[in-house]
Image (cartoon, helix red, strand yellow):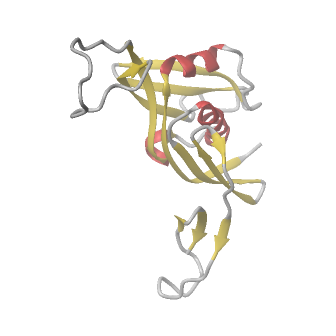
Amino acid sequence: MSGRVYRLHSTLELPLEEVEEYLNGDPDLPPEVTDVEVTRRNNTLILKAVAAEDNLSKYTPTAQLKASITENRVYEEEPPRAGAPRWEEEEEEIPSELVEFACFKGDRETVLQNTALQYPMFLVLREIALLAEKGTLTAITELDGELTAHRIVEGEERPASIEVVENPSKNDNGSGGVNWRDNKFISD
């Protein structure tokens, strides 16, 4: 399988524990990837592809997903809003805990780095996006000459399409960029 990732934008946030469970739970990885190496450097999580075949030089950097790690307080109930009237004399503490979140946020070069095995690692990111309850993943990919639009919102796949339009104001040869407008990818 050879493919390319042309556009990618991610605002995904999910508990670090869920990412680790997914990777440790024998995930269904693309055939080009035998394993995903997990490295944590301070507040950065790096998921690096391990190539299935030895045709890549040991010096060739394989694709990796990069996420920042943040710590957020998660409440079992909604916390009271500021300025709300207090009916009880004693304030009850709402049970909460600090949870580490993996935040895959940014465009292609920020979230999905290096080109060797880039498309297979995008497929891994897609599976992670389906687990996320917060954030979106949008992308345009090419596989075997066919462009595909991807859109996952809060763990749910949503319709996406690619529309090619001509924009003579940019240039006359028909080539141009690709944009996201009104739930559609549009190529200018």
- The quarter of the picture where the N terminus appears is top right
Q: Which of 133 and 59 is in front in this view?
A: 133
Q: Position of residue 31 (x, y in %)?
A: 77, 30
Vertical comparison of 163 with 172: above or below: above
Q: Position of residue 52 (x, y in %)?
A: 72, 26
Task: Give residue 137's position: percent from left, percent from top.
Answer: 56, 45
Picture quarter with the C terminus: bottom right
Residue that sits furthest to the front in the current view: 87
Of 62 and 92, nearer the camera is: 92
Residue 74 in the image: state x and y as whole percent.
40, 21
Q: Quadrant of residue 94?
A: top left
Compared with 143, 67 (above or below) is above
Which residue is pictured at 63% across the width and 20% down the height?
22
Is 178 displayed left or right of 100 in the figure?
right
Where 56 falls versus 150 (above or below)? above
Q: Which residue is drawn at 66% across and 71% down?
A: 163
Residue 24 shown left or right of residue 136 in the figure = right
Q: Which of 114 and 75 is in front in this view?
A: 75
What residue lies at 61% left-to-right and 30% top-to-bottom?
A: 131
Q: How many marks?
A: 0
Q: Residue at 59%, 71% (x, y): give it.
A: 187
